[in-house]
Image (spheres, rainbow, N blue to C red):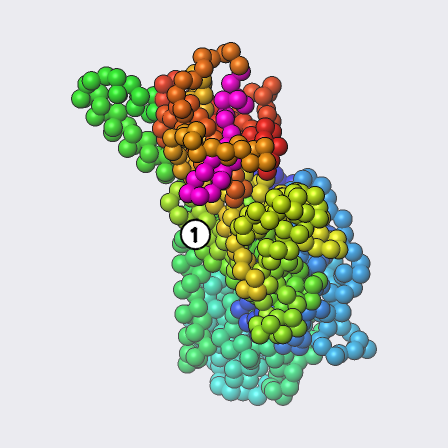
Amino acid sequence: MDDEILQDFLVEAGEILETLNEELVDLEQRPDDYDLLNAVFRGFHTIKGGAGFLGINSLVEVCHCAEDVFNVLRQGQRRVDAHLMDAVLQVLDVVNTMFEMVTNGQQPESADSSLLSTLQQLAQPAGEEQPAAPVEETVAPPAPETAAAEQELAEEASTEAGDEISEDEFEALLDQLHGKGKHGGAPVAEPQPVAEAAPTATGDEISEDEFEALLDQLHGKGKHGGAPTQSQPEAKAEPAPAPGGDEISDDEFEALLDQLHGKGKHGGAPAEPAAAEKPPAKPEPPAAPAKIKKEPPPPPKEKAEAAPTPAPPSPPAASGDKAAAAPKKAAAAGETTVRVDTGRLDDIMNMVGELVLVRNRLATLKSSIEDEEFSNVVGNLDVVTADLQLAVMKTRMQPVKKVFGRFPRVVRDLARSLTKEIELELIGEETDLDKNLVEALADPLVHLVRNAVDHGIELPDEREKAGKPRKGKVVLSAAQEGDHILLTISDDGKGMDAEVLRSKAVEKGIMDTEAAARLDNKDCYNLIFHPGFSTKSEISDISGRGVGMDVVKTRIAQMNGSVEVDSELGRGSTLIVKLPLTLAILPTLMVVLGEQPFALPLSSVVEIFNMDNARTNTVDGQLTIRVRDRALPLFYLRNWLVKPGSAPEFEGTGHVVVANVGGVHVGLVVDQLVGQEEVVIKPLGAMLQGMEGMAGATITGDGKIALILDVPGLMRKYARRF
């Protein structure tokens, strides 16, 4: 198996599977959307074609069964319902599992026979019993060595109900093309003529308008599904040789089928969907539905002798010309992009990071060298470096839609399992975020959305009693704010009751009654992030263990982000996640403890003020400082990070840096403030890897090494909090 072809298939199929996940959920909401039906059909068909070429027969089999189901839906012989969607979404899960196995170099096993049997039942028209006459059978997966052209022809020959033409229709087609009795086939009854089609004297091709007129004669005016779209410009009638031959080749036969049904069995959406949903008509009489045969007639081998004379253009053909504009534009846009391995982008980002360090070093030297020309050069370098840094960051950006795309399915499945009615609204899907953050955000957001669906939205009957619509609403939005991105998850559910949270905290031994009574509402809401805290009395496979929100807080803190929660009883809750746009280059506040510089992520810094011992108090054994009539926990970083006796005692009062740790403000006392500086995060050595409280290291503008502090980690290790 060619590794390059396999990698191309994996990339393309991965994108299709992501799209299918969204389209299937949309289809359940819009079952009459013909374009959406066609898009889903094309997705499964494309994956099946690539898998067949690579010899992944188990993937071909399950995709083919899914195609059968969607073909019946396209014919209007069955309606989309919850039972059907459950089966199709299960197919998508199976295909995703097989895809992961192929990605890991394993040969996937066949899908469960009960699932395939369910799909075969769903592929029958609604209410129709098993007919005694021959019916369509599932086509065996193509052999791995089958060439691409042969495979496509085989798929056309084994199309599902509504994609076949009967033997009588095919013979009538050849009669119109060559003249009655000149193609070597068995004579058939002559269809009712609509317009006289005489062969041309010189031309050896037929135009689309001529072919349209021919189909009108064969099926009846406007009953063949509309004019074929021009999204596949190569799908024209093949030119015939000299008028001596009376057979057509396999390629010409395939081109005729493409003109009848659309390239690759689906093509574009017909100009008249209502007509396309009806079964094709037989030549005699034109209005009667055609019988679907088990196998189509074998393709004749002789080529066309002559083409019919031009017929007046029909309205469907004109609409097909218009439909071709969008695919052509999309193809042109695709030529302007190129796939680049993400490892190369990471290397470029690392080199830009080194350039940033050099820039910082030169900026520090500029203040000590009084040379105007040197200062101008450093200033120009600063501007160019900032522009380069921004440009490279943009190459690593991905729309947050890559994460958001999975949530319609998550909400749909949860709503069905909890018997709730929920609408999910996605806002700001095109907001760009660093690719590493996009990947890391998946799990935290899943927990937040599941929490909103399970804990927030009430059952439909409860909502009606409260005067709300039966269907609840969850909104997931993303927006850029400066050098940060804000992700908001809100619901219109029952909200959180601060009193219930206080009593649960006391019940679980998190704090005593007196401490719980001092908590304001916002502090109570933040209790949901405490390990083991849950308001559910029963544990289920969805919630109740108290680990989900703790995971959210930990993961977001690892990304130098923060999460805040707000709620109104009876109105709903809102959680706001704030993250930096990138993890590669970090804005920091440089501080000094003893003689050692440290870097605090600027995203966690709320405010800074001078230390005033007169404002400090001890409450329940914890040193605090009053800030605007509110007591904040106070910690001296020097006591944690500077070895006693290794540095002279600091004689000044120091400064207090107020940091946000998981929605809770704490005061951190430092000896000196240096200022704001952008740094490049370097991983710690093997011996220091994983040390709690340290996020990495960097090189400062004056050439020293500074440790980057992980504030939540410091709180857990030294303060035994958070």
Residue 608 placement (x, y as % from top left): 39, 34
Dividing the picture into quadrants, the one containing residue 72 is bottom right
- Was residue 630 drawn as part of the magenta stretch in this picture? yes
Which residue corresponds to the image point at 50% horizontal and 25% vertical from the top-left?
Answer: 637
User: Would residue 568 be visible to someone looking at this image?
Assistant: yes
Residue 77 to residue 713: above or below: below
Residue 108 to residue 464: above or below: above
Residue 225 placement (x, y as % from top left): 55, 76
- Was residue 551 drawn as part of the magenta stretch in this picture? no
Dividing the picture into quadrants, the one containing residue 606 is top left
Residue 54 to residue 275: above or below: above
Q: Left or right: where does residue 618 sit relative to residue 651? A: right
Tell me where the magenta segment starts and ends, as one range.
Answer: 625-643
Residue 421 placement (x, y as % from top left): 63, 68
Q: Left or right: where does residue 196 sit relative to residue 101? A: left
Residue 594 placement (x, y as % from top left): 45, 17
Q: Nearer the viewer, residue 94 or 215?
A: 94
Task: Pick the quarter of the image with the N terminus.
Answer: top right
Q: Nearer the viewer, residue 311 or 544?
A: 544
Q: Nearer the viewer, residue 557 or 534?
A: 534
Which residue corresponds to the image point at 52% horizontal and 82% vertical from the top-left?
Answer: 222
Which residue corresponds to the image point at 79% horizontal and 78% vertical from the top-left?
Answer: 129
Which residue corresponds to the image point at 56% horizontal and 30% vertical from the top-left?
Answer: 714
Q: Which residue is disc 1 drawn over?
A: 479
Q: Residues within 10 Å of mark 1 (few under 14, many from 20)?
A: some
